[in-house]
Each structure stands twice: as C-alpha cells, then as structure tokens.
Image (tube, helix red, strand yellow):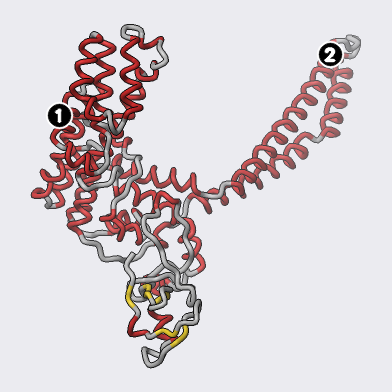
Amino acid sequence: MNRSFSDLSEPGFNEGFLVALAHFGAMQIANMLLRTTGTHPQKKCFLELGASHLSFLTSQIVDTLILNMELSTIKDAFDRVTKKQKLSSAKTQEMLDQIRQEIESALDKMQSANNSDPEHNYKAVLNELKANLLKIAPLSQMEGTQKELNVALSKYGKLLEKYFNPDISKAYRNIDVDTHTLNQIIANHFYRQELFDIGDHFVSVAGEPESASTMKAPFLEMYQILEAIKNQNLEPALNWASMNSDKLAQSGSDIVLKLHSMQFVKILQNGTRDEALHYARTHLSPFASSHMAEIQKLMASLLWTGKLDRSPYHALLSGSNWDKLAEELKREFCNLLGQSYNSPLSVTVAAGVQVLPPLLKFMNVMAGKKQEWQTMNQLPVPVELDREFQFHSIFVCPVSKEQATEDNPPMLMSCGHVLCKQSILKMSKNHTKMFKCPYCPFDIDAVQCRQLYF
C-alpha cells in the first residue's frame, strides 16, 4: 500500500498550524531543522531519511517558486540569446558555404589548367584562392557574431542566477516552535500520505512513540478502505459509514447515500434487476424524502438493466465516479477526525514559498538591518496570498491604517463602529476624556469599548 515519496505534492491546511503559516511557512521549519546542531532527534531523523526525501521538499519549493515568479524578463533574455544563436549559426554557415565554393572553384581551375606549366598554373590558382578568402574575411565576420552571442549568454546566465539562485536564508527568522507539536505535524503528514514506514521511523527517532499509534491507526483504516474502493469493493466503506452514520448526518454529509448509490449501480451492472430493486428498497428508501431527484434517477436506470451503457444513464458507469467517491470519503474521514482534508505541512510549504519572493526582495533592501527584521511583530510589507491560504478575517484600523495584532486588537465602541485599541487610547488621551467616533456623531467613552475576537 505504500506509495512513493513523490506523492507528497497535495496542498492542505488546518488551524493547528496557523502559527507556522504566519511565520512564512515551511521555510521556517526547514531552516530550523537544517540549522539544528549536535544530535537533535529531528535533524538526525531527517538525515537518516536520506537525501532523496529532502530533495523532494527542495524540488517542490523550486517548482512552486518558478510558477509564482515573474518570468517575462527571463523569457525576453532567452529570446535574445536564441536570436543571436540563430544569427551566429546562419552567418557561420554562410561563411562555410562561400569557402567551400571558392575551394571547389580552385579545384576545377587546377583540373582544367594547361599541362605545359602545371606548377605555374597551380600557384596562380592558389594565389587567387588566397586573395578571395582574404576578401571574404570569414574569421572576422564570424568573430563578430560569436562575440554578440557570448555577450547575450553572459547576461542570460547572470539573470538566471539572480532569479533562480536566491539566498533564501535572508528571509529566515528565529522563532520559538513547540517541538512536540512540530513532531506531530510532521509525523501526521507522513501517515496521511500513506508513508507509514517513514512515519514510524520519524516518531521513533524524534522520541514520540507514545503518540504514533494514536495518529497512525485512523489512517491505516482509511487507506484500507480506499484500497478496497480502488478494487471496486464497497463493503469496508459501507461498514465505516454505518458505524459513523450519526456523525456524518450531523455534519451534513451525503457520503452514505453516494456509497449506497454506487453499490446499487454495481449490483444493477453485475446482478439482476430484482437484486438491485431489493437493495434500493432496503438502503436507498430512507433518502427518498431528502434526495428525491437522485433516487428517481437510480430507479429509472432499472429500466435499462443489462444495457445501462447504452442508456441515458450511462454516466453512472463512468470509472471517474469511483475516483470521486474515494476522494470524498477521504475528505469525510479526515473531517470526522477533526483534521483538514489536506496536509498542514504541505500547505505551509506552499504558502511559505509564495511569500518568499517579496520577502527576499525586502531583505535585499534591508540587508544592513537584520536585527530589526528579527524583532518585527508583523510583516513590514504587504504580502498577498492566494485565497486558498486565507482562513481568517483581517481587521485594519480605519484611523491608523494598521492591521490589528494581539497587542493592538480591534475594539467595539458603543456606537457599533470598530477601531484598534491604540487609536482609541490616543483619541481618548489614555481613557481620560470622551471622544467623537470618526464615523458618526456619538460621544465615545473608552472604558466602555470591548475587544472583538474574530
């Protein structure tokens, strides 16, 4: 059941890893692990996992960086190089053709020369050939185009080095990380990717064996169910759904209906109409009131027993339905475990990589102020993340134009408007006087303001 390490490319997230995400994602984790000295269990384990495992993370980071970078400048430089190369090649070929023609012409003249004084004739032809070659000046012409090509290649190499070989350690910050939580996140990542041997080795070396079985067991069960679905065996999935039907219903999931629907189609395809009808009466009838359209579609398919592939309902037999069902079961399984569908570590790597380019650009500007960077409480420059990485609301004070923080939280005033705490303190002279709301005519007593929690 184990898959290769190259399958770890799925992004994912849960709230337990928000702190690491706020600290620029996986680069913080990678830097912490790689900078650890001595025989720290995390570093030792990563070293023992081998260069191939670490090279995966590196390749994912490089691939994502390339996708998120502005490549127009590099493309233009590459186009210039190719243009110069084609010009140089064409010029060289032109010179070679001229030289070949002159030599062939000289050979023809030698062969047709008067035999009375062949030596004199040969010398005359060779002198003419030499003069013609000097007139063509092949070396000087080819050197010119080759020089232009070398200049373009040199500039292109420097541009590649600038964009694709950045010193990412400039964006590193010293942060305090809960080692136990980090160990669990890494081990959980391995188990949820079906890399059970690697996960076991990690928790063993990292000194977390007591939590290994708790994390591992649910994912073992999940992949056993998924393996059965891969073989079009729905019994393990139906047993799991039956045992967790109440929880699935509370979460609003319809995975139970989808499992029974797939089993119904399987019976209709391989069995008889009576068997399929009996299964529908037993397992699908409870869903008739809430999912009438789906049930009617399945019941109509009974009319096409034995020729469902030629019916209006042939889509029910699509192989992609099994893949979709497996993905949805995996999602619901993780949901019942209280975990995200995707790996927290993977999404942190992806989010961290996305913010690396602007952070590196900022650090190049702030090269002489590394200490200031280490003590900043929030990002000094705006960094945009894709919507897939946005999980919580962000409040920006309309007065100070600053983003709320733990030390400067949003405060609800008695009029219903919201400002940050520091703005209220300044406007109220540290709670010593009333002040007017910037948005309405109400007089505000700072003592009555209440902190908001998003």
Q: Position of residue 419 (x, y in %)?
A: 42, 75
Residue reaching furthest to the front: 289
The answer to whether residue 209 is above or below residue 88 is below
User: Which residue sits at x=18%, y=42%?
Assistant: 247
Q: Which quarter of the rendering shows the N terminus?
A: top left
What amino acid type should be assigned to the residue bearing mark 1? Asn
What amino acid type should be assigned to the residue bearing mark 2? Asp
Q: Residue 33 occupies which quadrant of the picture? A: bottom left
Q: Residues within 10 Å of mark 2 (few under 14, many from 20)?
A: few
User: Which residue sits at x=48%, y=77%?
Assistant: 400
Q: Residue 256 occupies which quadrant of the picture? A: top left
Q: Which residue is mark 1?
A: 239
The answer to whether residue 255 is above or below residue 266 is below
Label 2 element class: helix
Closer-to-camera residue (209/312): 312
The answer to whether residue 212 is above or below residue 261 is below
CA–CA distance in space, label 1 to label 2: 92 Å
- The answer to whether residue 82 is seen in the rendering is yes
Q: Which quarter of the rendering shows the C terminus?
A: bottom left
Label 1 element class: helix
User: Which residue sits at x=42%, y=15%?
Assistant: 312
Closer-to-camera residue (218/271): 271
Q: Position of residue 71 (x, y in %)?
A: 57, 47
Residue 271: mark in rendering = none
The answer to whether residue 68 is above or below residue 231 is below
Q: Position of residue 118 (x, y in %)?
A: 86, 14
Q: Position of residue 231 (x, y in %)?
A: 24, 20
Q: Which residue is mark 2?
A: 108
